């Protein structure tokens, strides 16, 4: 049990250090791609029509507040877990469930977002979005 707790805490602290900057909060909270901003930022290149832009912006306006609340919850929960691990170590694994639940919700929301993009964009446009995303990622 202690080994598992130590491993979990080391992973959380490593991730916290890697993505500590505020600009990386969403990426830190979840590794799934953020495609809406990329799509809107490349609207001209993708040749989006006014209806497509409107639908994507509506989706973003509707869902971004929920996403940001979930991201903030993950960040706050991680901070509380770290503090708890440094002080009492009481129920750290149990208390991590709230953070993990928020991460699951982020995954669900991002998946719904991709499904919406697939519905709004043509197959060619969606493939272009994925290509643009891949070209901006560091090579592994």
Image: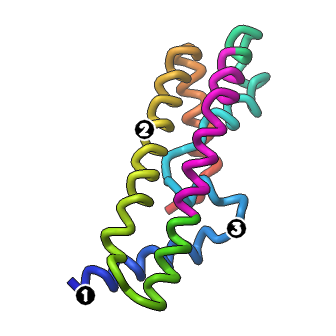
**In percent of the image, x 61 and y 56: which residue is there?**
72
Residue position marked by numbered label 3 in the rendering: 21
**In percent of the image, x 68 and y 13: which residue is there?**
52
**In percent of the image, x 73 and y 29: which residue is there?**
40
Q: CA distance from mark 2 to mark 1?
A: 31 Å
Residue 18's mark?
none
* Secondary structure of the residue carrying numbered label 3: loop
Q: In this orientation, does residue 128 appear?
A: yes
Q: Position of residue 85 (x, y in %)?
A: 43, 85
* Secondary structure of the residue carrying numbered label 1: helix
Of the pair 138 and 111, the residue shown nearer to us: 111
> Which image quarter: residue 124?
top right
Observer-side mark, 2 or 1, equals: 1
Residue 2's mark?
1
Q: Position of residue 64 (x, y in %)?
A: 65, 37
Residue most toward the left? 1
Residue position marked by numbered label 2 in the rendering: 108
The quarter of the image holding the N terminus is bottom left
| Residue 127 falls left or right of residue 42 | left
| Residue 123 falls left or right of residue 19 | left
Q: Which label's residue is closer to the chain start, 3 or 1?
A: 1
Q: Position of residue 106 (x, y in %)?
A: 48, 45
């Amino acid at each position: 049990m202690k080994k598992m707790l130590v491993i979990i805490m080391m992973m959380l602290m490593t991730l916290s250090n890697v993505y500590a900057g505020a600009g990386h909060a969403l990426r830190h909270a979840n590794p799934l791609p953020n495609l809406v901003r990329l799509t809107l930022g490349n609207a001209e290149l993708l040749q989006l029509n006014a209806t497509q832009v409107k639908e994507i912006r509506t989706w973003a306006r509707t869902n971004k507040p929920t996403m940001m609340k979930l991201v903030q919850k993950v960040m706050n929960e991680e901070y509380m877990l770290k503090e708890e691990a440094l002080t009492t170590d009481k129920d750290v694994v149990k208390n991590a469930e709230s953070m993990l639940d928020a991460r699951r919700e982020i995954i669900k929301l991002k998946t719904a977002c991709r499904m919406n993009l697939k519905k709004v964009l043509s197959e060619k446009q969606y493939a272009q979005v994925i290509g643009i995303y891949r070209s901006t990622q560091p090579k592994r």
